[in-house]
Image (cartoon, grey):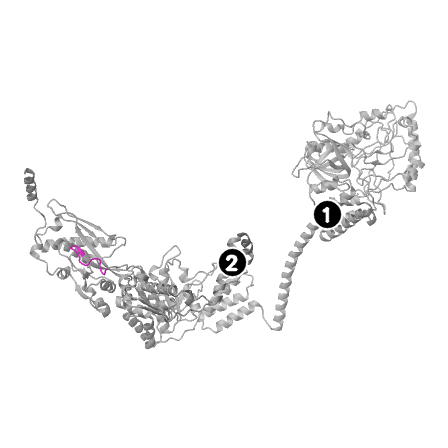
Amino acid sequence: MLSRQCLPRIPAARGSTSSSSRSRTLSILCSPRAPTRLGQSASRLQTFARHSRPSALSSFSTYPSLSKQQKGKGFFDGTVEPLSEEEIKANLEKAEAEEKDVAEAKSPGSNAPAGSGGQGAPESPDSKGSAAGGASSGSTGDGPGDGGKRGRKPSDRALSKPLVPEIYPQVMAIPIAKRPLFPGFYKAITIKDPNVAAAISEMIKRGQPYVGAFLFKDENADSDVIHSADDVHDVGVFAQITSAFPMNAANGEGTSLTAILYPHRRIRLSELIPPGAADTAKTSTEGETAPEPIPKPSEEAAQKGDVVASFEESAVAPPKSAETTQKQYDPTSFLRKYPVSLVNVENLTEEPYDPKSQVIRAVTNEIVNVFKEVASLNNLFRDQISTFSMSQSTGNVMSEPAKLADFAAAVSAGEPAELQEVLSSLNVEERMHRALLVLKKELANAQLQSKITKDVESKITKRQREYWLMEQMKGIRRELGIESDGKDKLVERFKEKADKLAMPEAVRKVFDEELNKLAHLEPAASEFNVTRNYLDWLTQIPWGLRSAENFGIQNAMKVLDEDHYGLKDVKDRILEFIAVGKLRGTVEGKILCFVGPPGVGKTSIGKSIARALNREYYRFSVGGLTDVAEIKGHRRTYVGALPGRVIQALKKCKTENPLILIDEIDKIGKGYQGDPSSALLELLDPEQNSSFLDHYMDVPVDLSKVLFVCTANMTDTIPRPLLDRMEVIRLSGYVADEKMAIAEKYLAPQAQDLAGLKDADVKLTDEAIEELIKSYCRESGVRNLKKQIEKVYRKSALKIVQDLGEEVLPEPKAVADEAMATSEEADKEKSEPSASEATTATEGTAKEPTETPRVALKIPDTVHVVIDKENLKDYVGPPIFTSDRLYDITPPGVTMGLAWTQMGGAAMYVESILQSALRSSSRPSLEITGNLKTVMKESSAIAYSFAKSLMAKEFPKNNFFDKAKIHVHVPEGAVQKDGPSAGVTMATSLLSLALDAPVDPTVAMTGELTLTGKVLRIGGLREKTVAARRAGCKMIIFPEDNMSDWLELPENIKQGIEGRPASWYSDVFELIFPNVDRDQANKSKVSDDKKADHDDKSSDSD
């Protein structure tokens, strides 16, 4: 048997880009079964070591030993390193021993079995053996008879290095997504298809880790198998699998794995053998050179799983020709059992070029310059360039432009199509141009990223720098005592404010606590602003600050007369109030409430009081208010909390004794947020408001020096406890003569001035004002009268301008020019909408309006306008009210009553009619209409019962109510009516119908009636008297209990009206029906039914 021998370590060619395999060596194991025959001598080994040509082996080749890098060589220019003397000597000794063993093996009788792992393999014509990467086993020796057949002498055969095969016509194809591979640069891929993963694992075990990598045309494609040649680009790379790592299982078979590819050269896909068609496809085409035979590894090596590179010669196997070996051996035949993609490929070589070309040199220099710029902006790019330059000197980079272009494309993040164009370019100049374009885009991207980074850093740096400088400046100023920081200044400012105020002791204590709290809070703390705002409010309340009051009676009378006409009782009450204040030195403890219809001057009276007393004036309305916080303030814990309206009034007025007018107190609301009217109880109580506690301030505030004046239209909706705390002063409506005086003295001059007719001769006659009051403005107040007078003067101004024309009243030239330019610009924008739209966005905001101050025009003295009763309708239209009363002559059953409304008093008629003739068969009934509410319906029922009782008592034979069907109506059905004061009027209307006696149309009455005929007290006698006078009444019948109210009425209101009190209805009956014929009234009103029937029968017989 042959003895086992191991070859010494042979230095391998060094790859240009190998970084992970530089220090790694691979042991070469001899086959355990196949005998080896080495006929090399020491001189042959030395000659091989010295004269071996430069290797084209990649740095990631799986040759057993890697060489050391030589300095000064170009990219991919590693050559065989000469053996040292010790290695030569050791090789010679082992070579002699091997020749001896081979000679014994050739002797007769030697029947050593052939190695199971391989068969004799002929050497390639260029003396190159097959090479395997990662895990490979190969044969570089000949069989026993091969050398003789091929005419090769043992002395001519030298040890060959295993290299990457230059011709590999059929490989397994792996599609690549996103970006292509470039020769000389690693690429890690993930194989998910278990069949492809199993095929790769077997390829590595067999020592054939070579694949073709082609880029998908579709960026979103994701597959490990190529189903059609149109799915990928035809130009790819021939790559070597340097290592593979299973992702799931330990052995990696049948599971996905991660493979590291190292491309060696460009190839073109000529034919695709899709999965399933590999059994019928031809492995090689005619005329092509067969791939170098790669024997199978030995069984022992396969069992151990070691990486084996064997150099064996078969001594027993019969000799075979090269042609027979090529036909029998197929390097990719084992892949046909897997559903993978096999492709026939052809190598691509670069077109020849002139290294001294000016264009190539210029593009090379530009690429190098762009590399430098990108490296200065991107640290990751800088590391890649450093790795590339470690194996390249400046001269070699310039002498290898094609590899420089591949490197530029490999490290750039370009589009897949652009990178594929670089890979497909075989013209070096064209490839460099495309690579430069991709690299330029990478530079632009890096510059943009660098700009964004610098902008962000500059902003951050600027803010940090400003912050540190400000802090240093504050520290320096604080050390020098020039200025303290913001918080210290704030504390000092609050202290200065507090020292100027006369804070009560309890308030001062709270202030000191909050100020101490603020001093220890950081300005960035959320509670800092809350405390600061609280201290701000606490120091803005005018503690101890009061305005000097004027209690002069003459001054008060002058002010009140200037602002208001009439209202003598109201003015007297105010003067009394001021006189008491003068004697006491203060007017605290009083809350006034003015009650009256709209337009009578309640709010303006409050303002006049403030002016008379020299107090600050503040008004706020509580109409519709539903939130208690508007009165009592919010808690400080809420965001945006504020004190109540009263505290805000003190802050604005800056005095402790302002006059606060609370308007529309009768219309205050009530909601889920509380009852504001209940909150006003504390505010408007003189006994409690000396220590008013606001929710926000949380300290007692003295409001006893504040003069509160409230206004209301009626007292019915004001809560009784609240009304009890106020002193009510009622303001009735104005009568005609008062309205006339107000119009002449106040309303007409104001309206004339507002209309621009102050100096013009425009006169509104007294007859015209009287007609306005009588036919247009019958309400209690003067607000509507003011509107009508303003309308008259506006119409006059228009008429004057139209009559005079533009010649007399020209428009100022500057204003006219500006208006003309504006109109021309508007016309231009309409004609050119597209241009105006473009300029509006940019110029619209920048254009500032320039307003030329206007001067009032003077009306010529020749203008004279007179508005009298005759031409009044030309200014305000036809009259609204055509008569003083609804009935000039009242028929039986119609009576005038008096009602009180929020608008003042009004005349109200009650109408009663008989629905059908009275017969003995008729049944009595009462129908009531007129939008009457409950109380008034009850009054009508009481009046009906009382009228029946009176007729039965005074006129027993008059059976009118026993058979009458009566309908009672109160006109103006759209207006709701309620109240008990119409009882007397309804009873009078029913009695007038029963007695068939009309009532005097100049008599009006009011009063509540009971079933026994008692006339009870009513309210609003002043307003009702004003309404009666407005309606032209001469007599008013009212309850005797209201005699005191009648006596208090001003004489101008009672003038021309006779007031007759009544305590029982009998008094009213005597006044209304003084001349009634009692005998006639006591007769029956019902016709004889029997006589009527007899007359009907006699007429039928005739």
Q: Which of the two discs, 2 and 1, labels the residue nearer the N terminus?
A: 1
Residue receiving disc 1: 439
Residue 510 drawn in magenta: no
> Dividing the picture into quarters, in which one does residue 53 lie?
top right
**Could you tell me residue 538's position as x and y percent?**
46, 67
Other-residue count near label 1 (Cα within 10 Å), few / some / many at <14 / 14–19 / ≥20:
many
Quadrant for the C terminus in the image: top left
Other-residue count near label 2 (Cα within 10 Å), few / some / many at <14 / 14–19 / ≥20:
few
> Dividing the picture into quarters, in which one does residue 838 lie?
bottom right
Q: Could you tell whether 329 is left or right of 931 in the image?
A: right
Q: Is residue 1011 above or below residue 300?
A: below
Question: Could you tell me what secondary structure mostly forms the magenta stretch?
Answer: loop
Q: Is residue 313 visible?
A: yes
Q: Amino acid at mark 1?
A: Leu
Q: Are marks 2 and 1 in contact (CB under 8 Å)?
A: no
Any mark on residue 82, and which?
none
Part of the protein shown in magenta:
883-894
Query: Viewer-proximal residue, 1012 or 746?
Result: 746
How far apart, in angstroms, are the residues tagged by discs 2 and 1? Answer: 53 Å
Q: Amino acid at mark 2?
A: Glu
**Could you tell me residue 252's position as x and y percent?**
71, 34
Residue receiving disc 2: 825
User: How many numbered callouts?
Assistant: 2
Query: Viewer-proximal residue, 155 or 928?
Result: 928
Quadrant for the N terminus in the image: top right
Q: Does dot 1 land on a helix, a strand or a loop? A: helix
> Dividing the picture into quarters, in which one does residue 1028 lie?
bottom left
Residue 891 drawn in magenta: yes
Q: Does dot 2 land on a helix, a strand or a loop? A: helix
**Could you tell me residue 34's position as x and y percent?**
85, 28
Q: Which residue reaches farthest front?
A: 807
